[in-house]
Amino acid sequence: MVFKALVVDIDGTITNHDRTLDLRVAKKFRELRVPVILSTGNPLCYVHAVARLIGISGMVIAENGGVVSTGFDSSSIIADGMEECEEAYELLSRYFDLVKLDATYRKTEVVLRRGMDVSQLREIVEDNGMGVEIIDTGYAVHIKNSNMNKGTGLHTVAELMGIQASDFLAIGDSCNDAEMMREAGLGIAVGNADDEARQAASMITKASFGEGTLEAIEYALSNGLLE
């Protein structure tokens, strides 16, 4: 099977250990014949800037599937659920000193600076029957709609492109990439991936970070999985 598109996470996947963009990966993306879709927990303005600088499509998945952009200068598909995320934040603020990140730019989720016991946050929202999920990506803590993830975002992008989620090769490193890798035709985790991402992947690279993504792409190219 030759995959029709590549969907890939940003932080920890196409970056170096210090979060700088791996320029070798950016160059490789531009050499591919298939579309490259960035998928991230970051807000839309961030991922659009990354896509623009790399030189790839403005069709992206942002906010862990909550926002899907159809292009740099076109409309976005924005999921519901922000109100419940804010309610969860207000509840959790009674127990913890929380710091919001990127609040001005977020449309579908509340993101917090790391440093608290995430299991305690989850227990509180579960005890109060809130329909939100709390995930720790290793870069930030996200309060998001439990029905929204990078997997649902991938299905939206696939529909917009006129293909199936199974037509994508997916590469990621974190728990928030797990659904995306499961829904794609092939999921590859880079060597620095967390346990949940590793369990969702069909393959794990020996190399980590951007070098791991280069390894994954070279593997796909050499085996006729990508063009």
Image (spheres, rainbow, N blue to C red):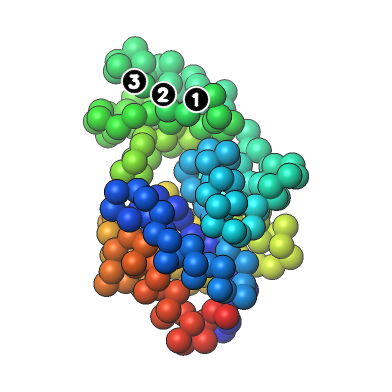
Q: Residue at x 75, y 45 (%)?
A: 74
176 or 60, which lies in front? 60
Neighbour tally class for label 1: few under 14, some 14-19, many 20 plus, Cα within 10 Å: few
Do residues under tags 3 and 2 come within 8 Å of each other at their CB atoms? yes
Residue 97 vs 188, above or below: the answer is above
Residue 12 vs 106, above or below: the answer is below
Residue indicated by mark 2: 100
Q: Residue at x 36, y 21 (%)?
A: 99
Q: Residue at x 41, y 23 (%)?
A: 100
Q: Residue at x 28, y 53 (%)?
A: 17
Residue 62 visible in the displayed image = no
* In the displayed structure image, the side of residue 83 where residue 218 appears, left or right: left
Residue 52 vs 80, above or below: the answer is below
- Secondary element type, mark 1: loop
Neighbour tally class for label 2: few under 14, some 14-19, many 20 plus, Cα within 10 Å: some
Residue indicated by mark 1: 103
Quadrant of the snapshot with the C terminus? bottom right
Three-letter code for the amino acid on which mark 3 is drawn: Leu
- Secondary element type, mark 3: loop
Where residue 36 appears, x then y in whole percent?
58, 64
- Secondary element type, mark 2: strand
Do residues under tags 2 and 1 come within 8 Å of each other at their CB atoms? yes
Quadrant of the snapshot with the N terminus? bottom right
Extreme top residue here?
94
159 or 8, which lies in front? 8
Three-letter code for the amino acid on which mark 2 is drawn: Lys
Residue indicated by mark 3: 98
